[in-house]
Image (spheres, helix red, strand yellow):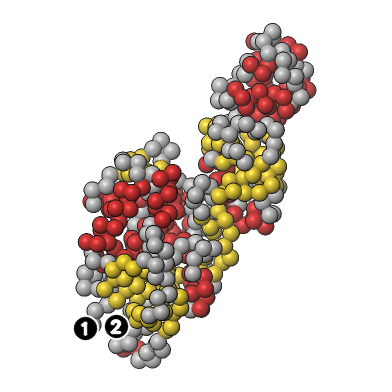
Amino acid sequence: MKKLRAVIAGGGAAGFFAAITCAETNPDAEVILLESSPALLAKVKISGGGRCNVTHACFDPRELVKRYPRGSRELLGAFHRWQPRDTVAWFAARGVQLKTEPDGRMFPTTDDSQTIIDCLQLAAKNARVQIRTRTALTSITRSAPSSDPSTLNSQPSTPPFLLTLSTGETLPCDKLLLATGGPKISSTPALAVQLGHTVEPPVPSLFTFNIADPRLVELAGLSVAETITAIRDTKLRETGPLLVTHWGVSGPAILKLSAWGARELHARDYRFTLLVNWLAGKNADAARADLAAARTAYPRRQVATASPFATIPQRLWERLVIAAGLAPDAIWTSVSNDRLSALAAQLTAAEFGVTGKSTNKDEFVTCGGVRLSEVDFKTMQSRLVPGLHFAGEALDIDGITGGFNFQAAWTTGHLAGLAMAGHP
């Protein structure tokens, strides 16, 4: 029987994991990984500020899927087959230990993404995966399927796919995985459409908000550990840390909003009103009561220097005091009830006009990709084209920040690799 040839297009996390899984599961198979650029695992390199946020310490699939704005229903069964616990064990078996940070993110104990890259490349080498960089998949030709039912589960004498590569050569293969990344920056959409698939239009996810507001000027780097953020006239609402940047705001509370609201915010051309509660857990009435108590406790002290809220950084507190209409040198005993209410509003429902977006550091995540209903999530095989598989960001799947996008890559790559190897 002739040797199975499996080709993986895409040298990122999903593609590498699929190639390794396929080659380890079926050592007799010829596994070829194609990467159009000279660099492999580029997103792994920059993830988590160069530390690589490998996954998240959430080991209940039912809870895990709640971190995916798109793909949660389809991933539930997939996570029962391969989840963060399996990812941690896989790396540990290859000598890479992961650690869990207080927010649940998991990193290699070395705090160096190169540790993950070296592990994946060594595993691929040991499994005899053939890796070809600077080689893109440009087109796919399918052979005519057999009409004989008795041959449907056997390997055809003519490989079902003939691939044309950017080098000008052609490459026949029996199994093909498209894992070339998000639809905005990859060749997957055109190739998938060429084979009859539907591609949901790509829009950015996990981005920061551009805001020009005097309350935030020269506060870049300042953060508040627990906030509640929301977008006016929508149901979008998130909690978590917020970071002030040179161009506006970022941090988990913002990035999660951007993920869940990716399509709606795109439709608004990234112009909307952001509401921020700097005192997570307190509403305006509770904040006003605390301010009234401060007026009694610190009657002769300046409002701008005597904050009753330890969680609000001093520089931000001063800006909010001024935004509430108080003079910088106003003392507590001079604050009227109306000004107390205005300050409570600044603390619990501050309004900021968002005028655009920026990429989160060097990371770029999109929602959009191959329509999920056209893929079998037990095998990651196309429901339209036998032998064709998808994994990672090529699919219309994206998670919030925290290692969830990588976990989707490991899971879908693993399941695709098993299926391509002929694993039942």
Residue visible at 39% across and 47% down in the picture? 52
Q: Do the residues labelled 1 and 2 touch (CB within 8 Å)?
A: yes
Can you give x and y, in whole percent of width and height, for residue 423 in the image?
28, 70
Q: Which mark is residue 1?
A: 1
Residue visible at 54% across and 69% down in the picture? 199
Q: Which secondary structure, mark 2? A: loop
Can you give x and y, in whole percent of width and height, for residue 283 in the image?
65, 30
Query: Does the image show residue 28?
Result: yes
| Near-viewer residue (337 or 182) | 182
| Near-viewer residue (63 or 51) | 51
Can you give x and y, in whole percent of width and height, for residue 56 in the image?
40, 46
Residue visible at 49% across and 74% down in the picture? 192
User: Which corner quadrant holds the C terminus?
Assistant: bottom left
Quickly name the residue at label 2.
155
Name above or below for residue 135 compared with residue 266. below
Name above or below for residue 424 compared with residue 249. below
Spatial CA span between label 1 and label 2? 9 Å
Q: Which secondary structure, mark 1? A: loop
Residue visible at 68% across and 31% down in the picture? 215
Count of numbered labels shown in the rendering:
2
Q: What residue type is labelled 1?
A: Met
Q: Which mark is residue 98?
A: none
Query: Does the image show residue 293?
Result: no
Mark 2 packing: few (<14 Cα in 10 Å), some, or many (20+)?
some
Can you give x and y, in whole percent of width and height, for residue 389 in the image?
40, 71
Q: Quadrant of residue 10?
A: bottom left
Q: Which amino acid does label 2 sit on?
A: Gln
| Near-viewer residue (246 or 203) | 246
User: Which corner quadrant holds the N terminus?
Assistant: bottom left
Sequence-first disc among 1 and 2: 1
